Amino acid sequence: MSAPAKEAVARGVEYLRRVQLPSGELPVLASGKPDPSIFPTAVMAHSLSFAPGATDVRERALDFLAAEMQPGGVWKHWPRIHPQHELLLPDLDDTACASAVLTQAGRVIPDNRALMLKNRNRRGLFRTWLLRYRHPLAMYAFFTRTSAKPFDADAVVNANVLFYLGQIPEVVEHLLAVLRENRERHCDKWYDNPFVVWYFFARALHGISPDAVDIIGKKIDAANPSNALEHALAACALLHIGHMPDVEILCRSQMPSGAWPAAPVYHGGRARKRDGTFGEPHPDTPYWASEAWTTAFAIEALARITV
């Protein structure tokens, strides 16, 4: 382990230790304002699993996730303290990521696999929303005032379900088609940054599809990360597919606080066009980001390459 990388990881973990909330949640902002959310902490807890020095932070994050579990072993995007918690349905993005990180840590949760496997469309893809938890008519305001639709089947959401459940042939073929057809910016209502898409695709596909490994590696090699988040995501994705990235820039871009700068990971959705692609998010659409989240991705990259 290089001394600069070891120091960067230690400073990053100490930063997360300072900013972690009493509940165990790791903070995230929606367009610059605090917005308690479950999904970011689930993803950050996974990243911290690669850093032995972050065990205490990760365990508190897992406690938060366990406390926010809904009956049947499912999760919503917002925790119970959020004023709009009751307006939401459980979704498979939060459920898959929280389930994966908890079970990998040896935590016991209800067996939710059959429930998830039943939540698929005719193409075998997983629907984002668990409609069985509330009749769609009861969700009229949510589905009419937002870009969410009852039968959404988003590609990154499917990648995260694949990461939890393992081999699902229809999902593997769908994700491969996205990569082959260069549809990373338009494959999912909530994610439009290719580096984010490659990260989640790589961690889901690396042990399943050699074709995906080859495509993702070539795409990242040809890409130009524009900020610390993209550098960290690219490095993590390359490590998932067995490539060795250069992480020197991550050590150089760490701030005096021990954190790395925030940049958007996902946003509040966008409308689907007639050709099946998505337009640009409305200027008022919120996006979720935080220094804590970029820091967790950077820690994952540096810890994995320096062990």
Image: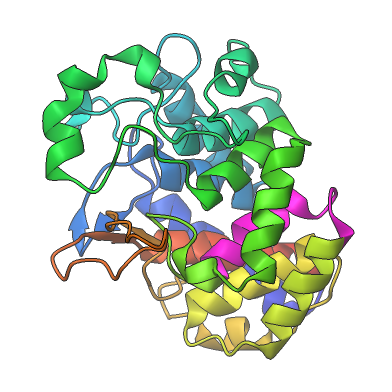
- Furthest residue in direction front, as rendered: 274
Q: Where residue 20 appears, x then y in whole percent?
A: 39, 47
Image point (58%, 15%), residue name? 112
Which residue: 59% across, 69% down? 233
User: Which sits in the foreground, 209 or 77?
Assistant: 209
Which of these two is toward me, 266 or 143? 143
Q: Is residue 136 left or right of residue 138?
A: right
Q: Residue shown at 38%/23% (left/top)?
A: 68
Residue 74 lies in the magenta stretch: no
With 58 as the anchor, is 292 left or right in this view? left
Decide if residue 277 is on the left or right side of residue 34: right
Rendered location of residue 95, percent (x, y): 49, 30
Seen in the picture, residue 224 relative to 193 is either above or below; the reply is below
Q: Is residue 208 magenta?
A: yes
Scheme of colours in the image: rainbow
Q: Is residue 12 visible?
A: no
Q: Which residues are magenta?
A: 195-210
Q: Nearer the viewer, residue 33 or 59?
A: 33
The residue that appears at 32% across and 56% down in the rendered structure is: 272
If the image is split into quadrants, where does the C terminus sit? bottom right
Question: Up-down: is 12 above or below 39?
Answer: below
Position of residue 268 measured from the top left corner of the image (x, y, whole percent): 27, 54
- Percent across and percent down for residue 287 are 28, 61
